[in-house]
Image: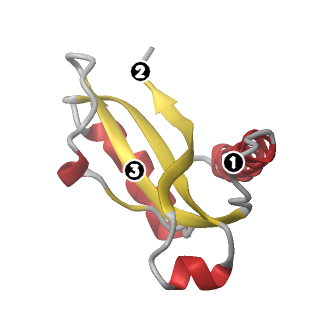
């Protein structure tokens, strides 16, 4: 992966996470029955798309960390003839407070985001 693409992907990830968080909070603020404004990241993971257009199964994804090693692994997937595209994805859980979240009183998957890393198209 070229340094420029690495930088562009990192910038796109930051923008996507920020936009998704903002959208999620805006949506939650408009819900009269909820005050769930505490968002916690579900993490980030890599998802590949096969030549048949199908996304990898959840069990085939792996954790994404914005390190040089992980970006090198994303670039190396270009050598896999069965992969047509790569995405980094993530999501949020929502709770009314940090205490509620710690106590398990939260809603899973209240928001999500996805960033294309590369595609053969």
Ranked by sequence position, the earlier of labels 1 and 3 is: 1
What number is the disc on residue 120?
2
Give the mark toward the camera: 1 or 2.
1
In the rendered image, the residue lying farthest to the front is: 33
Task: State if disc 3 and disc 1 touch (CB < 8 Å).
Answer: no
Question: Residues under labels 3 and 2: Cα distance?
Answer: 16 Å
Q: Position of residue 92 (x, y in %)?
A: 56, 57
Ranked by sequence position, the earlier of labels 1 and 2 is: 1
| 32 lies left or right of 76 | right
Work out whether 97 lies above or below 28: below
Ranked by sequence position, the earlier of labels 3 and 2 is: 3
Q: Position of residue 15 (x, y in %)?
A: 76, 46
Q: In front here: 81 or 106?
A: 106
Q: Which residue is mark 1?
A: 33
Question: Residues under labels 1 and 2: Cα distance?
Answer: 45 Å
Q: In front here: 79 or 98?
A: 98
| 73 lies left or right of 90 | left
Name which residue lies at 55% across and 44% down. Answer: 112
Q: In front here: 40 or 67?
A: 40
Name which residue lies at 69% across and 44% down. Answer: 20
What number is the disc on residue 46?
3
């Amino acid at each position: 992966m070229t340094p420029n693409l690495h930088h562009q992907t990192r910038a796109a990830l930051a923008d996507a996470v920020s936009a998704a968080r903002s959208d999620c909070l805006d949506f939650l603020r408009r819900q009269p029955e909820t005050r769930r404004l505490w968002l916690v990241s579900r993490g980030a993971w890599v998802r590949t798309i096969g030549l048949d257009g199908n996304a990898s199964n959840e069990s085939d994804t792996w954790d994404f960390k914005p390190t040089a090693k992980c970006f090198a692994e994303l670039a190396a997937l270009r050598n896999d003839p069965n992969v047509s595209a790569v995405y980094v994805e993530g999501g949020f859980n929502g709770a009314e407070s940090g205490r509620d979240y710690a106590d398990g009183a939260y809603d899973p998957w209240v928001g999500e985001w996805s960033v294309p890393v590369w595609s053969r198209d």
